[in-house]
Image (cartoon, rainbow, N blue to C red):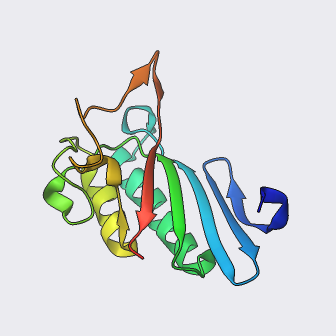
Amino acid sequence: MTIRSFRITTQCADPRRFFACLEHGSLVFHLVVLHAPCLSKNKGYGTRPIDAIAGWWKETARLFTDHITSDLVWVFVDANAPINQEFSPHAGAAGSEEPTRKVLGEFLQALTLFVPSTFEHFHHGPHATWTLQRLQVPQGLYSHQ
């Protein structure tokens, strides 16, 4: 089986979100790519940046509800929001404390998604997000099924 074996449908796409459905016979799964807004770059007159970011995550959750039809979902995300075990069982102890963790944690809980890289049996070493000249490596989120 190769990628050409699948029927691939783009379900939703904008500059920060991409939802695709892949089907091959009875196998159906979704791939989602997200690039969340950054708190430090979300500025504007009369706005609260955290409110704008929370609104983005809320809209993204709505898109999940509208487009995800399978229990198999892989989400690749530059969340710009590290997470910690406050949102257990969706994130483990290898996460971290950051101001935007609450909106990401609520998103994970609402959609029953998990962040395997925050669990010590998957992730070894320092838990800070790896960066290279301000380029962040996305985290993977996985559905509970």
Q: Tell me which residue sits at (35%, 74%) in the image.
A: 110
Q: Tell me which residue sits at (39%, 45%) in the image.
A: 46
Labels in figure, total: 0
Q: Against 140, is 61 above or below?
A: below
Which residue is most to the top?
A: 133
Task: Report x, y in % for residue 112.
Answer: 36, 73
Q: Please state which of residues 28 and 107 is positioned toward the viewer in this rendering.
A: 28
Q: Tell me which residue sits at (70%, 70%) in the image.
A: 21
**Quadrant in the rendering for residue 132:** top left
Task: Report x, y in % for residue 26.
Answer: 70, 84
Q: Please state which of residues 41 and 10 is positioned toward the viewer in this rendering.
A: 10
User: Relative to residue 9, is residue 56 drawn left or right?
Assistant: left
Quarter of the picture containing the C terminus is: bottom left
**Quadrant in the rendering for residue 39:** top left
Task: Report x, y in % for residue 44.
Answer: 46, 38
Q: Against 58, is 128 above or below?
A: above
Q: Please state which of residues 134 and 5 is positioned toward the viewer in this rendering.
A: 5
Quarter of the picture containing the N terminus is: bottom right
User: Relative to residue 119, is residue 144 drawn left or right?
Assistant: right
Task: Report x, y in % for residue 75.
Answer: 51, 57
